[in-house]
Image: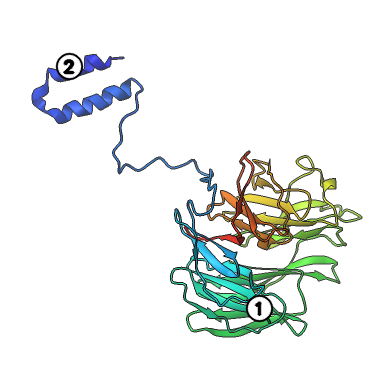
Amino acid sequence: MSSIPGLIQRCSARRARGGLLLSILLMLALGACGQPIPTTANQTPTPSPTGTPTPTPKPGSAFAYAFARDGQVWVAQAGKAAQQLSHLPTTSGQSISALAWSPDGKHLAFEVKGTGSPVDYVIDASSGDFSALNVPATSAAASLGWANNKTVIAIKQVSGKMQFWKTDITNSSASKLTEIDSATQVKIANGFIYYSQLDTNLRQIMVHRFDVAQGSEGTPVAITPPGSSTLKVNWDVAPDGSRVLMGFNLATPDPNWDNGFWNININDSTDRAPIFTNDEISFSTFKGTDTITLSFSSDGQTLLLDTQNSVGPITEGVDDSNFTTYSPHVGITSPLGISWAPNGASFALNSDNDSGQSTIYTVASKSAGSAFVDKASLLQWSPQS
C-alpha cells in the first residue's frame, strides 16, 4: 500500500495540473490508509438500518405532543417549551377527560368536565381557535377519536344506549351514525369504529367494525374461543386495521386455541400467533382481578402489555424479538393510558393513580423510564412530526 507522503510527493511533481487534482489525491490517499474522508455539510447522511427506530427519550425532542394541565390543553413543538393552547373559563374541579389528535396533527378533540355535563371541543393546534362539538350533552364521559382529518367521532352514552356521532369540523355539522345496546370496549381508528361484544349464542367475544364513510358495519370476527375467561383484557387493533391483540384464560382450555395472548388476523381468526408466551413470562402471573391492556406501536412493529397493579410494562417485536421488561411499573386500566411516538420508538404511560404523572419509555432500552411530572396528564404524541 502506498504511503501518504509518497502519494503527496508524486502529486507535487505534477502541480501544473492544478490544486483541484491535488485535493482529490489527498482524499484518495486518506481513504487508502483507512482514514475517514471529510464530507461536505450538505452531504446526505447514511440512514439508520431498516427496522431500527430512532430513540425519542423525551416528548418534544423530535415530535409535537399535547397534555392536560389545570383543566386546559397544552402543546409543545420540537425543541420548544410547552404552551397553553386552550383558554377556557376555569371552574372549580375542571379537568380534561379525553384528548385526541387528528391524523394530520393539526387539531385536537377534547372533553372538559367539571360543573354540569362534560362538553366536547375541537381546537386548532396552531392558532388555538376552538369550537364546541354539536353532540349530545351527557353526564357520562365520551370517547373521542377521528375518522379522518376533518371528522371527529364521539362515543356517547344516551338513554341507556351507546351512540356513535360524527362532526365535520369544517362546518360544525353533526349527525348520529348508529347506536348499539352496549360494548365492552371501543376504539376509533383507520376510518372505522371498532367495538367488542359478547355473542351469547357463540359464547365468544366478537370485534365489530363500523365503516364511518360507508355508514355500515362489516362481519364481526371472534377474538376468543367459546367460554368465559377469568381475565379482564383490553384488546387493540393494529395501525393498518389488519390484526387484533387479545388474551384469555378459560377454565377448560380450547383444544385448538390455548390460553394466553394472541395476535389475530381481524379477517380470519384462525390466522393467529401467540405473543408474550409462557417461556417469556409465566401465564400464572396474570390474575383475574387485574386489568391487562395490550397495545400495538404506531408503526405496528412492537407489542406492549401492561397491567393495572403488578405486571409490566413489557414489549416484544411482532417477530418475537427484543422481549423487554421495563421499570418503573405504571398502572393503567385502558388503552387511553398509552401513547406511542409516531416512529414507534417510544411510548408513554399515563398513570391511573396519579393524574399528574406520565412516564416515558424507549423501546428495548435497558434504562428505566423517565417520569414526565409537571402536572401533566393524558400525554399524547402527535401522529405527525
Left or right side of 192 for 343: left
Extreme residue toward the left, this view: 16
Q: Residues within 10 Å of mark 1 (few under 14, many from 20)?
A: many
Q: Residue at label 2?
A: 10
Q: Residue at x 85, y 56 (%)?
A: 288
Q: Amino acid at mark 2?
A: Arg
Q: Residue at label 1?
A: 118
As measured in the structure, the alpha-carbon distance from the residue carrying label 2 to the one carrying label 1 is 82 Å
The mark nearer the N terminus, 2 or 1, is 2
Q: Position of residue 368 (x, y in %)?
A: 64, 42
What element does badge 1 sit on?
Answer: loop
Tell which of 331 and 80 is nearer to you: 80
Tell which of 116 and 120 is nearer to you: 116
Q: Position of residue 350 (x, y in %)?
A: 66, 58
Q: Residue at x 84, y 68 (%)?
A: 202
Q: Nearer the viewer, mark 2 or mark 1?
A: 1
What element does badge 2 sit on?
Answer: helix
- Say whether residue 213 is visible: no
- Does 65 sit above or below residue 315? below
- Does 89 sit above or below residue 100? below
In which quadrant of the rendered view does residue 268 lie?
A: bottom right
Q: Residue at x 74, y 46 (%)?
A: 276
Q: Position of residue 60 (x, y in %)?
A: 50, 54
Q: Amino acid at mark 1?
A: Pro
Q: Residues within 10 Å of mark 2 (few under 14, many from 20)?
A: few
Extreme residue toward the front, this view: 92
